[in-house]
Amino acid sequence: MDRSIMAARKCSSSGIIALILFLLLAAGTSSATAQLSAGFYSHSCPGVYDAVRSVMKAAIGREQRMGASILRMFFHDCFVQGCDASLLLDDTASFQGEKMATPNNGSVRGFEVIDDIKTAVEKVCPGVVSCADILAIAARDSVVILGGPNWDVKLGRRDSTTASFSGANNNIPPPTSGLSNLTSLFAAQGLSQKDMVALSGAHTIGQARCTNFRAHVYNDTNIDDAFARTRQSACPRTSGSGDNNLAPLDLQTPTVFENNYYKNLVCKKGLLHSDQELFNGGSTDAQVQSYVSSQSAFFADFVTGMIKMGDITPLTGSNGEIRKNCRRIN
């Protein structure tokens, strides 16, 4: 046989093999790194949005604070292993979850609401929607129901089969954080300082426990005196006394999502030390001022930050699972 023909056939078969290998690799890669999309359930479970919204409306109707609690739960989940519903897993005799970690223990709440949403979604389309996506939608709906901005939630996450107790203890910014520590912890999740200031505006709703703001109202000097005295009245100086007494994070409207949080910071009426750090003569002062001047600017940047946070290392494709019960692995 002519050597040139043999060489051509050899090159041709090598090319075919290379093409097959490339296609297999590409298929595997796309499966592992599938992108989240707003229309992920448009065919498999279009009723998911109504199911989530219905339960969230009822929950907030019973207790308006619940909207803030669900939004905070999403934040605490995403900062540990990404937005994978690892926070929802209960401890067992052989499994340590994240619920008992210092930032979550006795603090993160609303797990029963997520259970109710999961039950409602399972009735509409069983085995289709992940707990991680349910939490992402519920966080968005909490903001909208309380008067905040709306956005298209990117979906397609799957649920983790692991959790990280140490990650929960180390990755979530404590209320004692200074500006540098806040910036570093957000940067570790791929979020900029601008994202951090915008996402901190979530504190325009909800309440905090005395144990988290005691040091600020008694020891810090960058706080309005009258405001400090008001908060001290329900938060005794001695640790262990009144630790769980609550105070609103937003002095005026703790159940309405708007920009009063930033107005309070400018008046030195931030409840947490970490809140007031955003307006304390540092690099974020100007951004805080811009949100005081424009609620629409805050809303736009908050939405951008929420979408970026929702993109933190999601499990997609064949990774993870769709939990039947959000509290335990299948």
Image (cartoon, grey):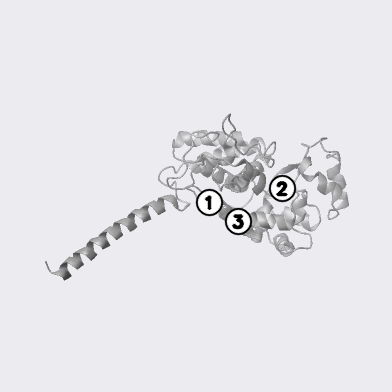
Residue holding disc 2: 174
Percent coordinates x, y for residue 88 in the rendering:
58, 38
State left or right for residue 127 relative to residue 260: left
N-terminal of the pair, mark 1 or mark 3, is 3
**Marks 3/2: CA–CA distance:** 19 Å
Marks 3,2: beta carbons within 8 A = no
Relative to residue 92, is residue 143 depicted above or below?
below
Q: Check disc 3 and report the residue beneath it.
A: 305
Q: Residues within 10 Å of mark 2 (few under 14, many from 20)?
A: some
The part of the image, by quadrant, that contains residue 168 is top right
Give me the C-alpha separation between circle 2 and circle 1. Answer: 22 Å
Question: Which element type, helix, strand or loop, lies under badge 1?
Answer: loop
Which of the 4 quarters of the picture holds residue 89? top right
| Three-letter code for the amino acid on which mark 2 is drawn | Pro
Q: Which residue is mark 1?
A: 313
Going by the picture, which residue comes out furthest to the left? Answer: 1
Q: Which of the two residues, 272 or 5, is positioned nearer the viewer here?
A: 5
Looking at the image, the residue that sits furthest to the bottom is: 4
The label nearer to you, 3 versus 2, is 2
